[in-house]
Amino acid sequence: MRVVTAWTREAIEALGPTTDVPTTAAIVEVNSDTIYAAIRRGEWELTRVLRIGRKIKIPTRDLIALLYAPESVPQATPSVPSPCQQGEYSQVTGGAPHASCGCTPDVSAVIRPLRGS
């Protein structure tokens, strides 16, 4: 394990393509036994786990993505689909404007029969 006072993106990238569990523990500031136990139970989901024989390696790319990924803006999911989302349903006819909103679905849309009909 490499001792670093502050884990920056550059310091993690300098580790190479993979690192070990003790270094990963230092980067995410947890005890390495905690990570080993989570991996053993199949509960470690923060990064991929590469098992090479008895060795466990953690991809540094996963750590960088975990710690330095661009923050995404939360998307509000409408509880009721808007009229313009009608084209997503399996039996919408193509080309004809929707009566409720007036938008025209993609011309390549087709009517599909229900299963079992």
Image (cartoon, helix red, strand yellow):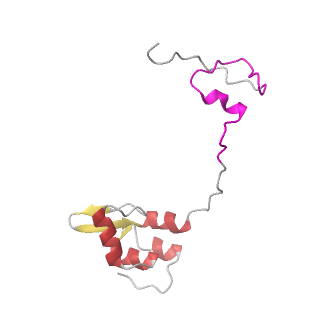
Residue 97 in magenta stretch: yes
Residue 2, above or below 110: below
The secondary structure making up most of the magenta span is loop
Of residue 89 and residue 71, the one placed in the foreground of this image is: 89
Of residue 65 and residue 11, the one placed in the foreground of this image is: 65
Can residue 1 be seen here? The reply is: yes
Residue drawn at the location 45% of the way across and 77% of the way down: 27
Can residue 20 be seen here? The reply is: no
What residue span does the magenta drawing correspond to?
77-102
Residue 45 in magenta stretch: no
Where residue 56 appears, as percent x and y from the top left, is: 29, 67
Where residue 88 appears, as percent x and y from the top left, is: 61, 30
Where residue 41 appears, as percent x and y from the top left, is: 29, 64
Task: Give the quarter of the image for residue 16.
Answer: bottom left
Residue drawn at the location 78% of the way across and 28% of the way down: 101
Where residue 6 appears, as percent x and y from the top left, is: 51, 83
Outermost residue to the left: 53
Residue drawn at the location 66% of the way across and 19% of the way down: 94
Outermost residue to the right: 102
